[in-house]
């Protein structure tokens, strides 16, 4: 099994174009041998919104 996680950030004025492109990319990947499923998830927040410290295994990571 292979999982890939990517974060794509686009200008707000280009969202429709990016969403259409992601649909085309998903269709392409689904045609490849061995690919079972492809998911793209639209975030409702932007990367700069993450201001809280992250906690990993009880340790603060800044």
Image: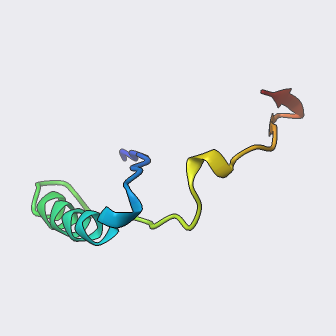
Q: Viewer-proximal residue, 22 or 38?
A: 22
x then y, percent, for residue 32: 11, 56
**Height in image: 19 above or below 7?**
below
Q: Viewer-proximal residue, 37 or 18?
A: 18
Point out the residue furthest to the front here.
Answer: 13
Model colouring: rainbow
Residue at (39, 45) in percent of width and height = 4
x then y, percent, for residue 52: 81, 44
**Image quadrant in which you'd find residue 58:** top right
x then y, percent, for residue 29: 17, 58
Whether residue 42 appears in this view of the structure is yes
Whether residue 37 appears in this view of the structure is no
In this rendering, would 36 be left or right of 29? right
In this rendering, would 11 be left or right of 46? left
Residue at (78, 27) in percent of width and height = 62
Point out the residue furthest to the right here.
Answer: 58
**Image quadrant in which you'd find residue 19:** bottom left
In this rendering, would 6 be left or right of 61? left
**Height in image: 4 above or below 39?**
above
In this rendering, would 60 be left or right of 8? right
**Height in image: 60 above or below 39?**
above
Residue at (34, 65) in percent of width and height = 13
x then y, percent, for residue 48: 62, 46
Residue at (67, 51) in percent of width and height = 49
**Height in image: 26 above or below 10?**
below
Q: How many marks?
A: 0
């Amino acid at each position: 099994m292979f999982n890939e996680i990517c974060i794509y950030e686009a200008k707000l004025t280009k969202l429709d174009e990016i969403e259409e492109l992601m649909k085309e990319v998903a269709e392409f990947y689904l045609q490849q041998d061995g690919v079972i499923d492809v998911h793209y998830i639209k975030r409702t927040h932007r990367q700069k919104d993450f201001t809280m410290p992250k906690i990993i295994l009880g340790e603060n990571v800044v």
